[in-house]
Image (tube, coloured by chain):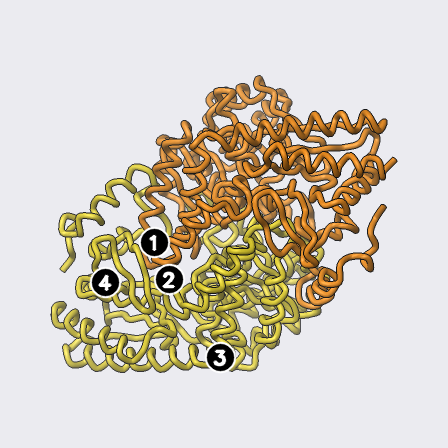
Chain colours: A yellow, B orange
Amino acid sequence: MTIADTTLGAREQALRGRADKVIPGGMYGHMAVRAFSGAHPQFTVSGAGARVKDADGREYLDLMCGWGPVVLGHRHPAVTAAIVDQLQRGDCLDGTAPVAVEYAELLVDTIPAADWALFCKNGTDATTTCVTTARAATGKRKVLVAHGAYHGAVPGFALRGAGVTEADQAHLVRYEYNDLASAEAAAAEAGDDLAAILVCPMRHDIKQDQELVDPAFARGLRALADRTGAVLILDDVRCGFRLDIGGSWEPLGVRPDLAAWSKAIANGQPLGAVTGTDALRDAVRSIYVTGSFWTGAVPLAAGLATLTELRKGEALPRMAQSGTRLREGLAAQAAAHGFAIAQTGPVQMPMLSFAGDTDFRQVTAWAEACVERGVYLHPWHNWFLSAAHTDAEIDAVLERTDEAFAALR
Amino acid sequence: MTIADTTLGAREQALRGRADKVIPGGMYGHMAVRAFSGAHPQFTVSGAGARVKDADGREYLDLMCGWGPVVLGHRHPAVTAAIVDQLQRGDCLDGTAPVAVEYAELLVDTIPAADWALFCKNGTDATTTCVTTARAATGKRKVLVAHGAYHGAVPGFALRGAGVTEADQAHLVRYEYNDLASAEAAAAEAGDDLAAILVCPMRHDIKQDQELVDPAFARGLRALADRTGAVLILDDVRCGFRLDIGGSWEPLGVRPDLAAWSKAIANGQPLGAVTGTDALRDAVRSIYVTGSFWTGAVPLAAGLATLTELRKGEALPRMAQSGTRLREGLAAQAAAHGFAIAQTGPVQMPMLSFAGDTDFRQVTAWAEACVERGVYLHPWHNWFLSAAHTDAEIDAVLERTDEAFAALR
């Protein structure tokens, strides 16, 4: 089922050979395809709507959306126009461009828990800034974090060990996601040194079936924060603007004190944000955080254009509809082909696993078969849908996934 | 000398009023102008070459270059063309865009100490990745860092206290810049737990006169690293591609094991990079670092275009020539007006201070007088020149600085 390296396209092979010389491992981080596939192209050269092309001209229906950022579709015309318009004025200026104010105003108007916004580049900048703000606000140090939760690939949050010291995470106290008793126990362990509770809107740990939040757990964390004076931080980096435009826990009526945003907020342009409540305004002013490009105008213009599109109200229902169509189709195909699968998490952020496939061999073979047939998806990281995923695109996906199931059998 | 807020332009005032509501402090980090001036506009709306405009249409000769990133001039046509070209193909894709390979190849070809390159967004991403790599390579924890040196506004390197815990910097050991004995003492203190020596190409601490590196100090650090097995990390974020295209210590013949790059490498687009030697290839592969936008194609295309321009060989001599012209002009003006000033650091990154002006009142008044006359510069952070600073632009600057000196008297 696996395509050997030698059957990859000629341009892909040539690029891999060149990359091996000048980029560590040929590629690093989440994009290093050799870590999860023998079939996925390492290189993609272009994107349009819900499709991407590899270096050899093969087109893929895209279920990864750039690993999350692309929420309106690749090269959305309104976002591209905003980028080009801002480029014609300026990008990295001496002062802030007015678009920063316009975009902050629109975020505050859109997100009920937001009274202010601060901009950065990475999701990790946002989660780190939230934790620093919470510590400044409370004068305390301990931060509750779920076992296995991804909040950024920096020493302070890293899940892997190389190069990370014990001191980097000395003040993290772990709890089990969706287990309120464990969070309360962690808070008790932190005692009077508790600064913050950091939590994702759902459980989306790597190589795990996704798990939606138990509303009682979310409400319980809010109550725990209120009772202890801890700051409740929602890490909405991965889910933000896909599940609910007001914040991923807004449908539950649970509002965080601080929220971290990135990925989808600028449809692929590099941007992160922190939003927070008035109560934390002084604390965030008291810390010193900054970066050379944090108020760069072009990504902010892309953010403003993206949010303006999202507020029109069509994109989020579109993703939910496409996600449901995809989930139902995959379920029927798996059943028809005799596979026991699980589809987990919200439909807009699909994830598929095979029963008993603890070493991921079956799902990897299936994912590779999908890629061979022109559907780009991941074996053990959640996928992402965008507003460019029409019913017709989902049907084209399903045609190919059905062949992949057949090939797997 | 200070312009009261009420005399700022009407659009500037309106933007400040709006920003105060939705952005902490109206602006945060290095760009928060109220922290250093009553005259600087917080908002700039456009840039072209060596000039920027504020919201009220006032034009400034720009000596800050976006606080460093703009090395070729605002809206350099070759960079803008590369951005637009890449935008028309794709930005944040599922795989890496081939431009990442082309750019890594060009970096490796340009920088003698670089056998590979890894991309990120912030300068802080780069310095953090260097430290993590060094720890992975050596299995040790301690990192020597100069007192007062800026390596990023994250808890691991922060110079200010709010929200930062002792654990965040538990493994930093401080030395005095340009004092080899202090670095050797710090290494002795680290003992057999020494992972890295982190150093900037010159001393550019905030609110301090700049200080060029003593070549014997640079060579001494290299020897100290070799003797102890520590990794020598050059933080070339601020100086990179302004002083020497091969790395800021290349003229000294001192090559680091790892170097951190950002700011000027993509002429304002958000990009950082780590470069390193073959000896550290396995170590950098062993750590897990990544970010959603780290291989975003548009900033990489800007980086490739910027480096291609820089390699033509005109930009760096141009900045040196303009910097010398500016320094000589300012020196003559100060003398003529009876002021004792110091101009420190490399001419391409000017800094001016007044003798005995320990509270920065005199330099602030002078900087405000410059801004009023249409020259954008900073009272106590170094300035930056770009390749767009022609002799004629420098002469226009000098005409106005002379008036500012006269007004100060």
- Disc 4: which residue: A59
Instruction: Assess whether mark 1 and mark 4 are in contact (beta carbons under 8 angstroms).
Output: no
Residue that sits furthest to the front in the current view:
B392
The circle on residue A31 is 1
**Chain ID, mark 2:** A
Question: Is residue B193 visible to us here?
Answer: no
Distance between the Cα atoms at labels 3 and 2?
A: 24 Å
Amino acid, disc 3: Lys
Pick whichever, B380 or B186, lies toward us: B380
- Disc 3: which residue: A312
Pick whichever, A322 or A72, lies toward us: A72
Question: Is residue A240 visible to us here?
Answer: yes
First in sequence: mark 3 vs mark 2: 2
First in sequence: mark 3 vs mark 4: 4
Q: Do labels 4 and 1 share a chain?
A: yes
Q: In this view, does A256 lie to the left or right of B397?
A: left
Amino acid, disc 2: Trp
**Chain ID, mark 4:** A
First in sequence: mark 1 vs mark 3: 1
Counting from the top left corner in percent of width and height, residue A204 is at 41, 67
Instruction: Assess whether mark 2 and mark 3 are in contact (beta carbons under 8 angstroms).
Output: no
Distance between the Cα atoms at labels 2 and 4?
A: 17 Å
First in sequence: mark 4 vs mark 1: 1
Pick whichever, B87 or B284, lies toward us: B87
Distance between the Cα atoms at labels 1 and 2?
A: 9 Å
Counting from the top left corner in percent of width and height, residue A253 is at 56, 81
Distance between the Cα atoms at labels 4 and 1?
A: 18 Å
- Disc 2: which residue: A67
Q: How crowded is mark 4: few (under 14 residues within 10 Å), some or many (20 or more)?
A: some
